[in-house]
Amino acid sequence: MFDNLTERLSRTIRNLRGQGRLTEDNIKETLREVRMALLEADVALPVVKDFIDRVRERASGQEVLKSLSPGQTLVKVVNEELIRVMGEANDALNLNVQPPAVILMAGLQGSGKTTSSAKLALWLRERARKSVLLASCDIYRPAAIDQLKTLAGQVEAEFFPSYPDQDPVAIAQEAVSQARKRHIDVVIIDTAGRLHIDAEMMDEIRRLHETLQPVETLFVVDSMTGQDAANTARTFNEALPLTGVILTKTDGDARGGAALSIRAITGKPIKFLGVGEKTAALEPFHPDRLASRILGMGDVLSLVEEAERKVDKEKVARLASKISKGKRFDMDDFREQLEQMLNMGGLTGLMDKLPGMGQLPQKAKDMVNDREIHRMVAIINSMTRQERSFPDVIKGSRRRRIAVGSGTQVQDVNRLLKQYLQMRKMMQKMSRGGMGNMLRGLKGKVPQGFPFQGL
């Protein structure tokens, strides 16, 4: 996420941290680099100008110049100004109303409204413990209603059936009425994509808003359109009273201009980020955490929250007990660790949140992908129960059979066995002397090839 911006700013920040003393010249050079990084990220020009002016003003003040470590203090200023631009803190959904709370989804065609509606339903059901009803008012796009019905089944939300020959306002009214009768907490209304210049379609969504009086009207926009996303959101807000924005496809956005422009241009908060295609790939937007990630400092808090939700604590406890008793770490245990990693968003998701990963060379980042983990799991699944329990028996002919069974090469099997042996040694160190002993044994190194090939 936002790789180009992170790489450029991280490089600038690294150079700045090494400065024992700030002068007018190196402040000017730093701000020039920051300005170029933001413009290349497609951040709106007025936002860039305001940001640079505020950082320059603070950089020239006593706060920075009189600091014992002026370089680090200026980094802190840049971080704080990024947070200010994006909105200070997470702006949560307002659900403190008499149920059902109605959420109206609006946006352009292809922005991801239907998928985001389902993602939001899953988030509300799992995190906020709310019952959710999904209803589609998109009577124009072929199969839009069927798509939402399918997604509702996947996220285990209720679905209100509708048909292309119905009036969108009537559909929405009936959905809310049914939710009220069935004591459902939240109704999410998915609407048709529309352009702000389409007077008839804009009139339709205004009628929907006036009839429903939704507690939240969320504008769904593709982050990859850069500052155009902010401009579109502003235009929609002039026609419809928006309460927030869902920024989609941020996992494919290397620039980040939309995230940095929307709040400043529209005055409306980004409430969620779409970070992938899966229905669970929706994150609440925390400006402070995103600023930290943009500056290459990671987002450990989100990583911990992710682990709390997605790591199977029983399996972790079982493995810890097994290792503490000196029992062998086998291939089944290894596979569980790989699957836990995938549950937390895979390597790419973890790297985005780990401090210092922004400093890795691009070539190294390109080598990190979740396909390797899936390949490793496939290889382990091709082993017999005996081979998984006693991997030392896996010799030449067995390796060839496992490679054929998993659709891989013998070299892949050899590499996995090598990585497994390194993990087993780590676990043995833990059993003999705890985590500290294991870390000393590693000497600050990741086991060779696991799972970062070639690093």
Image (spheres, rainbow, N blue to C red):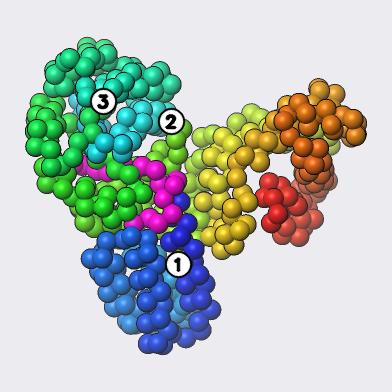
Left or right of 444 on screen, residue 54: left
Mark 2 residue type: Thr
Mark 1 residue type: Leu
Q: Quadrant of residue 48?
A: bottom left
Q: How far is disc 1 from disc 2 in space, using C-alphas?
A: 31 Å
Residue under circle 1?
Answer: 9
Left or right of 3 on screen, residue 339: right
Asked whether 73 or 178 is in front, the reply is 178
Residues packed near mark 3 inside 10 Å, few (<14), some (14 to 19) or many (20 plus): few
In the rendered image, residue 242 lying in the magenta stretch gets the answer yes
Give x and y (percent) for residue 233: 21, 47
Q: Which residues are magenta?
A: 241-257
Residue under circle 2?
Answer: 279
Q: Is residue 114 above or below residue 87?
A: above
Give x and y (percent) for residue 442: 76, 55
Residue under circle 3?
Answer: 141
